[in-house]
Image (tube, helix red, strand yellow):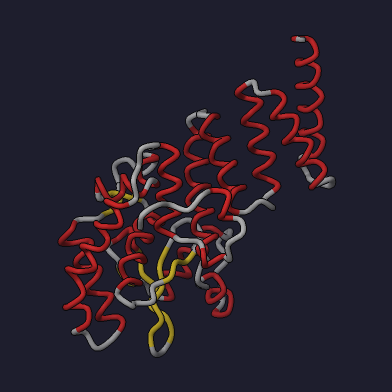
Amino acid sequence: MTDLPSWDSLARMDDDALPLLGTALLIARDEYPGLSPEPYDAIVGGYVDALRGEVKAQDSAPARMAVINRYLFDEVGFGGNNESYSDPRNSYLNDVFDRKLGIPISLALVQMEIARRLDVPLDGISFPGHFLVRLPVDDGILVMDPYNKGRSLSADELRDRVSVHCGGQTPDDSELLHILAPATHRAILLRMLRNLKALYADRDDWERVARSSDRLLKIAPGLSEEVRDRGLAYLKLGHVAGARDDLTRYLHAQPDAQDEEAIRSLLIEATGNARRLN
């Protein structure tokens, strides 16, 4: 990997043509402007070289995955950051490689990148609350938790986890399979950015909230709620012209939105304030 993709190229790419590692590092470059991708590509390559012989010697996909998990989580020492789960560094992939700490989605991305380079077809699952990974096996799929050293999860445990986020409702088999569908690269990257956006909103860091919404729109330009949220962040920052443009664009795209009245009131107030200042 000699360079990262450009932000302006991402919207035109098919969902799974988006490079996961490259785009995740591109997200990190916003926070670390001097970030170079080569050292991290080399780290992944080193892990793959160290694993290749033992992985090839296994006769099943679960056995190959067990070798990868043991190496990543036990030997190299990747793990979940239980002490500082809300630290934004857990979502910046350079920090995840450097510190060996992450959250489920960033650890999953490391796991997936290495597994795929070893021809182990590991996919992500945009599971409610906690990102997971899945591996096809002869009789179905093996679902694993990257935040807990790749531990496999039973169907009953998965149902219990879903029910916590669905008002106590337990999914039937077809609903559970739908939830366990592979996440596209675009969906994974959007979730990473939304995690960062939520962390920064909790800290009232409106500049980074606006940046996160802007980057979400670079990957998926049709997300009108991100136009709204960028506009609201601009208002917090006092960028009235940018806020007015975004909030007007949001109302045109979503004329029947539930928050239409509230957004329109904010627009009127912002416009009035700008006129008084002028």
| x, y percent for residue 39 | 27, 51
Q: Is residue 91 toward the left or the right of residue 52 in the image?
A: right
- The residue depicted at 26 percent of the width and 54 percent of the height is 79
| x, y percent for residue 263 | 77, 34
- The residue depicted at 63 percent of the width and 36 percent of the height is 230
Identify the image quadrant of residue 225.
top right
Q: Residue 153 or 164: which is nearer the viewer?
A: 153
Q: Is residue 249 toward the left or the right of residue 207 in the image?
A: right
- The residue depicted at 19 percent of the width and 71 percent of the height is 51
| Image quarter (top left, top right, bottom left or bottom right) of the C terminus | top right
Q: Residue 92 or 194: which is nearer the viewer?
A: 92
Q: Is residue 100 toward the left or the right of residue 154 in the image?
A: left
- The residue depicted at 22 percent of the width and 78 percent of the height is 55
Name the outermost residue toward the top: 277
Q: Residue 56 or 85: which is nearer the viewer?
A: 56
| x, y percent for residue 219 | 58, 53
Is residue 212 shown above or below 203?
below
Q: Is residue 140 toward the left or the right of residue 83 in the image?
A: right
Q: How many marks?
A: 0
Name the outermost residue toward the front: 2
| Image quarter (top left, top right, bottom left or bottom right) of the N terminus | bottom left
Identify the image quadrant of residue 63.
bottom left
Is residue 113 shown above or below 233?
below
| x, y percent for residue 93 | 36, 49
Q: Residue 77 or 165: which is nearer the viewer?
A: 77
